[in-house]
Image: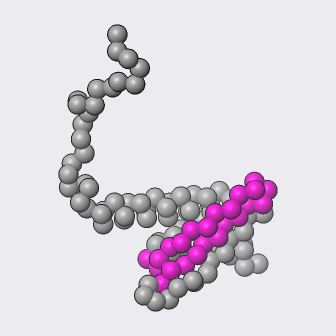
Amino acid sequence: MKPPGSYKIAHRQRPHESSYLDAVVIGRDRAQRIVDSLRYEISRGSDSQSLRIRQVFSTPREIYRIELSSPDLGYQRTTLLDRDALEELLEADEVQSAIDKADL
């Protein structure tokens, strides 16, 4: 009988070494997941949800702050995005309609 906590790790599959070295791909995939998550939350939001987008830095890169809050759920989310990610987020029709509702 094996003592608790001893596990065989010798036969686990190891990730490719190139995946550790390619930080650009890892960062791009992470940014895409963040934009997709924001798009989903904005599209399923209720009427009490508020959305604010503000520019916080202009140099050396344009950085935008996206504030999403749902008071009925007690939920707030603040995310910083660069210009490319913000443009990708704003391409979605459901995000555009949420922004149009917020402006009214």
Quadrant containing the C terminus in the rendered view: bottom right
Q: Residue furthest top?
A: 1
Q: Residue 80, position in %: x, y?
A: 53, 72
Residue occupying the point 24% across, 37% down: 13
Q: Is residue 76 magenta?
A: yes
- Comparing 46 with 19, the one in front is 19
Q: Residue furthest front?
A: 3
Q: Is residue 20 left or right of residue 28?
A: left
Q: Residue at x 20, y 51 (%)?
A: 17
Identify the residue at the far bottom of this view: 59
| Depth check, front residue: 25 or 57 | 57
Indicate whether 61 appears above or below 52: below
Name the residue: 23% across, 60% down: 21
- Left or right of 51? Residue 33 is left
Height in image: 78 above or below 4? below
Residue 91 visible in this rendered orientation of the protein: no
- In percent of width and height, residue 22 lies at 25, 61
Residue 4, image quadrant? top left
Q: Is residue 86 magenta?
A: no
Is 89 left, or right, of 2 in this rendering? right
Residue 61 in the image, given as x and y percentages of width and height: 44, 84
On screen, 87 above or below 59? Answer: above
Stretch in magenta: 62-84
